[in-house]
Amino acid sequence: MEERNPIKTSEKLTYGFGCFGQNMIYSLMANFLLFFYTDIFGILPAAAGTILLLARLWDAVNDPLMGMLADRTRTRWGKFRPYLLFTPIFFVPFAVASFSAPELSMTGKLAWAAITYIGFGMIYTASDVPFWALSSAITDDTNERNSVVVYPRFVATVAIAIATLATQPLIMAFSKPGRPASGYQMTALVYSLLTVVCFGITFFFVKERVQPVKQEKSGFKDIYKAFRNNKPLLLVIISGFFTGIGQTAKLSMLIYYAKYNLGNEMLYTLFAGINIPFILIGISTVPFFCKRFGKKATCIGYYTIYALGSLGFYFVGWNNFILLLIFNCISSLGMASPQVIQTAMIADTIEYAELKTGKRTEGTIFSSQTFLAKLTAAVTSVMIATLLSVFGYLPNVEQSSQVLNGIHALTAFIPFFSSILGIIPIALYPLSEKRHAQIVKELHQRASD
């Protein structure tokens, strides 16, 4: 039987701090890599987007396998903590290589981009799956989990905020004349080294309390079963897919929006950075509203705020800068909060699956979240790259009114429609807090028999 005492705030903080560096490097990859490919490395937008999408086809296999490997792991340090100590080291070479621009033919450039990006994705998986699966091993109390997962999501938002404010200045500070890629390389180096340190802190200060149940080793067929027999998980995955697209699209488009619609690339830092306090307010209110209204209703509420703010953003237009910022900030209240709730929902589906199958597969189940993060980034990049090409976008030139209107529409409507679509599966989510408590009680009774 696990300890029933509340988790100390200090431990929640050190768990949350683990994803600080990782989210800075993820922010760099998600928000600047497509721009780096098109405007620095010289790859056409459609080709760059295709590379990002093809990498996700491999992740469809790689991520669940990593989850299965984590589920099979048994060490004196636990199931998940060892991965936080050793795998982040490999972030360093792959992150720097991803933002390198060697003199190659177009075929060589495409091969370089594919190899380095896929390699980075594999290292990301090897650290991210165990990190989030660890939340289910810290406690099996659903209310405690709501509190626990807020910390990494809150810290992740702070990390993204810092990256938003610091990345462009760092790139410019590190850039060397005639070597435009140098600034990106050094920024990637700084962020990846920070990732190693942050994951190390989590390794040393966070405990795994929920002990693995005695069971047969999972096989390939169990990956399929873990998802097929888990309706609540499938609904959260579908909703999370739309959440990720909406959030990634907004952040990815802002660099284009600032450079071309607003006429000043440096406004990206102001425009994105002013969102951060509102994102943090939204995230910090998640435990309160979840406890009062439940996860489902709270998640739908945040989705609605994001959708309405994005709609207002579109109708204001980029010539009214103050109103544009106001609606941008309103949408930010609901921008990241659904991800916090969905992480807690995924953790709750672990006990649901354990009750049905007799197997506890935290790693396999949480691999869906890691895969989603990368899939949505790739799908969004392909979507944006394709639509920019359709609108007639050409890098580093003055854009036509058609392109400017297209950039504005993409920045507003992708988040709007993704929010509306994300509400539907959450509305069908059947695992209430009361039902989850009953499941945990049944599992404890089964273990004591």
Image (spheres, rainbow, N blue to C red):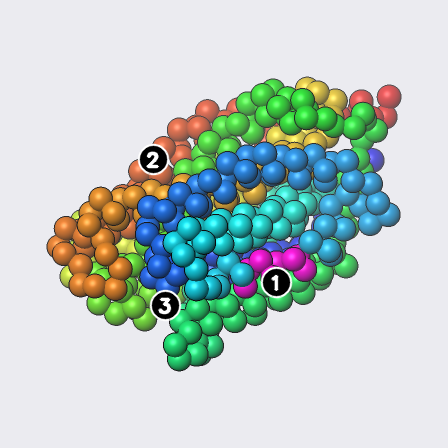
* Number of marks present in the image shown: 3
Residue type at mark 2 is Ile
Q: Which circle's residue, 3 or 2, is located before the other in the chain?
A: 3
Question: Which is more toward the observer, 172 or 328?
Answer: 172
Counting other residues with Cα less than 10 Å from the Cα at mark 2, is it few (<14), some (14-19), or many (20 or more)? some
Can the viewer see residue 300?
no
Question: Which is more toward the observer, 83 or 77?
Answer: 83
**In this figure, which residue is indicated by the disc labeled 2?**
420
Identified at 80% across, 22% down, the residue is 446
Residue furthest toward the front?
A: 105
**How far apart, in angstroms, are the residues tagged by discs 3 and 2?**
28 Å
**Which quadrant would the C terminus be assigned to in this image?**
top right
Q: Position of residue 434 (x, y in %)?
A: 61, 28
Please tell me whether mark 3 or mark 1 is closer to you in this view.
1
Counting other residues with Cα less than 10 Å from the Cα at mark 3, is it few (<14), some (14-19), or many (20 or more)? many
| Labels 3 and 1 touching (C-beta < 8 A) | no
